[in-house]
Every structure is written in structure tokens, then in C-alpha cells.
Image (tube, coloured by chain):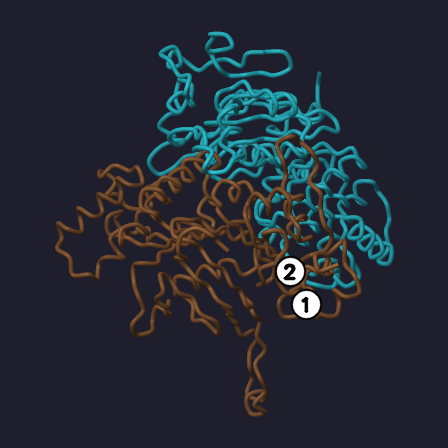
Amino acid sequence: MAGILDVENLSVDYATPSSVVHALRNVSLTVNEGEVLSLVGESGSGKSTFALAVSRLLPPNATLLKGGRVLFRGEDLMRLKKPQIRQVRGTGIFMIFQNVFLSLNPLMKIKRQVTEAINVRSKRAAEKLDKRQEESEVASILKSVRIGDAEDVMERYPHQLSGGQNQRIMLAMALAEKPSLLIADEPTTALDVTTQAQVLLLLKEIREKSKMSIIYVTHDLAVAASISDRIAVLYGGMVQEVGPARQILSDPKHPYTVGLIKSIPSKAKNEGPLEAIKGAFSWDDVGEVCAFAPRCPLAREACSKGIPTLNQLDKTQIRCINFGERYEQ
Amino acid sequence: MSSNSKPSLQIENVVKKFYVGEQGIWERLRREKRRHIKAVNDVSLVVAKGETLVVLGESGCGKTTLGRLIVGLEKLDGGRISYEGKEVKYVRDRGAVRGRLQMVFQDPSSSLNPYLSVSTCIAEPISKMGLGKQEVAAKVSDALKLVGMESLFMARRTSDLSGGQKQRAAIARALISDPSVIVLDEPTSSIDVSIQAQILNLLVELQSLRDLTYVLITHDPNVAKFMADEIAVMYLGKIVEYGLPGDVLKNPKHPYTQALLASAPKLDGSSPEAIGGEPPSLINLPKGCRFEPRCPHAMPKCREREPSLISRDNELVACYLYEDS
């Protein structure tokens, strides 16, 4: 089934002064219409690189390897020229980042920034809006993201608002543009727990109302649990397990996912130590073998024979030889 | 509050003020009082030897300032902090005790000097003790062993370490002067989830090995649950609830604690519950209870006078809902 976004064999390398890092290797993922797909992983897993590659916002030292395709509504984004990609970014894909203070212009009032987003949409839809209409739309959009005194907030600058308010303004801009795909890269990581809950609920509401598809990038499985339909667990630049959120959380199969869930503290210290995953992620482990093997409690010799393929099991796919000893060519 | 053993750390009515805004020449000439906020406002806590007190709260609640006060990194504006009967003084004051109180900071990448070698970094707390080179090296290697790192790391620069290794090195630095109290300020919030459990296990192991007293500052109820012998919940500079983890986390009394726990996302996929509003700023506190503007149970009384901590079922809670009825 073709989704709104079909990513096929996406590979990204970063050039560093001393070496080349394979940040993403042959990642294929599909986002269906109106679906929330969470990308979960720790630093170095490639989750942010995936988000950036899809929005064509990779830094200059990154190279997209040949053979990868990112089909957005059937159109390969990797082949588009700059002006065309701008068009897609403005109207089709909207990305919000972890650090909102860097994504909002500090010298522009909130009103102008949201108006910019509204203009992108009205241009696309060939609507004609006068100043007053624009202003009232800004106010109503700000209200819809639960900014209480919208008229007052409109006249302020980002630094006068809190992190939670700014993140909501980013969401307001997303709402104004009505994109079909929202990519959110750790949007609540820098926020407090109570503010995070507000933003998560808002995202859920937006998604239900506007049928937007969302790619939600996070390191926190619990956050992913509360928002996603499907979850993809990444490690070492590869998808290790992908499937329906419920199933992955209640019955994880890949040893890494199992370890991640077990290492979330759920007991008190006098009930014994936590079941931690041993070791740490290292780029040295990433090669033509299973990247997780050095930390895996189930690792055996066969794990270093090659990169395991994604094995289909029910509705999930697992990259582990315990579910079928096959290797990538 | 602790019944067993003698208190190791005693915090009594501690106040810390910060001045806000510029004071221009006109204000100075008119001798206007400078505006200030109370980041920590009349906080009293007791931690027993070898136990962990968790301070749970969100950013801006004053939990880090409280931690810095405990180790003497900030000057007190009121109250008293003592450990094992001795008063804790501001580090720059004469007679300040050094080494017995240590702190592990939130972000090891910024608390360890990236240009120094691991061994220089770890040896910093004992560098002025007049020890010989070999003695220092032996102590560093012991400290590294304690946190599960091999001595071959000694010569590396701290910038070459991974996040988890850096936090281990920071813990080793805190251990080297043989402290009795360690303040841990969000020790796992900047490292990956898969490493968090390792660090928490290490902290618990070290605690029982060295009979350490911990003050652990966190916003994460899961971390609090695992580490705590007692929990104090802080909101805008004040303790709103204080008790055993079994009570505070399982059966929270204060509406803020309830809201905080309900808004933490859970693995079962249940939707987090959000309370409205943002915390008011410390410059402009409400006259009554500081949680009243966001509280679902607010009563007229709450708007008038601030509730003080009262004892209720083995806990302390600052809320009129639990006043004698």
C-alpha cells in the first residue's frame, strides 16, 4: 500500500575530518495517510538524520547515497530542485524542531511569523486575504493551540514567551499552513513534564481534526507510546523493529527494544538493580554485522556473519537472526 | 522525618533570594529597594545517613538552587544547613569545609573541562591537598575503578568520552575526596535511555558501598521511584509535599503532585493528562497558594493566604484540602 510518504533504501553518510559515518543505511519506511509514526532511538541511531533527509535539510557534510528514494505523494523529493523543494516544504511537509528558540525569528513579532505561514497557504490555495482577515486568522489559530490571551501574545517577541508557548506557536504555524505531513523532531524534549503533556494532547487533537500525518522523533518510548500508531525503533542507522505501537510496547521482539523497555525504572532500589543494557553505542560496532550484537544478551557467533534482514512476524518486522537467520546481500 | 539513624544533612528554613532587573541611578538615588525573587523559600528537609532524598520538580522550581546551597556553591539568605552537626558555609567564606560535600551536575559535557585529561579532571577536588603525584594517581585509579572504568581512560581527554563515560567520570570526581553527601543534579537527564539504567544502578551500588547520603534532583517520577527513600516535591521555591515514595508517588495528596504524575507519559499508551496554564513567574506570585491559578480544586480560601505544610498520614503537605475538617 502506498502511503503519503514512502521512503525506500535511504542511506546517508556524514563526512567527518577523519572518517565517514554511515548515519543511515537502507532505511525503508512508510507513513500512511493520517498516521503517527514514531522514530525511537538513542543518539547515533539516525532518527534525526531521517527527519532531516525527508525535509531535505541535511547539513552540507552529508551525502545521500544513490539508490535511495523519498516518495512524497509519489514524487521523489530527492530529485527536486531547490525552488520545488521549497514549495513542498511550505505546503506539503512542515518540520518542527527541539529548540524552538532557534526556529522562530527572534526579531519578528509572533503575529508576523504566523502571518507568513498563513500567506504560504493562501498563495497555494489562491485565496485573497486582506490585513484584517489575516489578523483575525492569526488570533483564531493561536486560540486553537490554547494560547489564552492570543491578542496580547501576537504582539510579543519569542523571547518574551516560555518554551511551551513557543512550541505551541510553531504548531500554530503548522496548522496555518495545513501541511499533509508534520515532522516533529523531539518537540517536547526541552519542555517540562506538565507542558509536554499539554503539547502532546494538542498534537493528538490537531491530528484528529486535520487528518495530518505525523513523523514523531523521540528518544522516549513512553512519549512515543502516548502518541503513535506505529513505532520504528532505530539503532546504528538501521530500522531494528517496526510495527504497530501497541504490539511493540506490550510484546517487544528485538533484544534492543526489550532492553529499552526493561531499563525504564519501574521499581524501587531495594527491589534489586535495574535490568540495564550493557555497554554503550559506538560507531565502531557499525559495520557489516548486527550493530547491536556487542551489547546484546542473546548475541552469538552467527550475529557477526552479516547484517540480519528484516523478518516479518505478524504485523511487525524485526532485524534479528533469532527470527530467521537471513542476511542482507 | 526519618525515624532510623541520625540525620546526616539538615536543612532548616533555607531562603535564597536573587535580585532581578537593573537598578538604575534614579532608583539608587531614591534608595528604592531592589526587586528580588525567592528561588528557595523557607525550605526545611532532613536526610538520614546513607539515604536518598529526591527533590522532584519542574524547571524553575528552585531545585537546582537548593542543591547548590547544600554544597555551599551559593550563599544563604536565611536559614541554616548543616551536615553531621557542622554548619555548611559558602565556599568562598573562611572555614568552609571542602570535599565532604560534592555535587554531580546535570550535563557532564559542560561540567568537565574538555581540554583536560580524565585524570586531571577527576583529581581536581584533591589537587590542593598537598598529596604526592603517585598518591593522586592511585586515588584517581581507585575512583575510576569504583565507577566501572578502566585506568587506561586516565590519559584520555574528557572530550573523547561518550555521554555515559563522562557522567561516570563526573561521579568519580565527586567520589575522590571521600564525601559523605553528594548532590546529584539530574544525573541522567542528558544521557541516553539505554545508559540511564547503568548509571542509576551504579549510584545505588556506590551508596551502599560507601554509606553515602544523596540528594537527588530530578523531574522524572520513574527515576524518583527507583532512587528515593524520601521525596520532597517542589513548586516555585517551596516544598508542597514531603514524605515516603510509597505515599507521595502512589497516593499523591497535593494537587500539583497529582498533576505532575498524571502528565508523565506512560508505556501503556494511555494519554497523559494535562493541567492548564503555565507556572506563574516568581516575580509575580499570587497572593495565596502559588498553585491556585492552575489548581482544579481551588477554593476562595486559597486565593487569600498561602497554606503551610501540615502533617497528614505520615506526610507533610501544603494544601487546604487536608486541613483539619
Q: Taking A124 as reference, is A183 left or right? A: left
For badge 1, the amino acid type reads Glu
* Chain letter for mark 1: B
Assess disc 1: are there few (<14), some (14-19) or many (≥20) residues with their C-alpha within 10 Å of its C-alpha.
some
Question: Which circle's residue, 2 or 1, is located before the other in the chain?
Answer: 1
Q: Residue B153: horizontal and vertical position, in percent?
A: 25, 40
Residue farthest bottom in this picture: B29
Whether pointer 2 and pointer 1 mark residues with C-beta atoms closer than 8 Å, the reply is yes
Q: Taking A133 as reference, is A39 left or right? A: left
Q: Which residue is mark 2?
A: B318
Depth order, front residue of A79/B181: B181
Q: Residue A195: horizontal and vertical position, in percent?
A: 66, 49
- Identity of the residue drawn at 35% across and 12% down: A301
Q: Taking A207 as reference, is A127 left or right? A: right
Residue A292 in view, yes or no: yes
Quarter of the C terminus of chain B within the rendering = bottom right
In terms of image quadrants, where is residue A51? top right
- Is A195 above or below relative to A286? below
Q: Which residue is mark 1?
A: B306
Q: Are marks 2 and 1 on the same chain?
A: yes
Q: Which chain is brown?
A: B
Q: Residue A228: horizontal and vertical position, in percent?
A: 67, 30
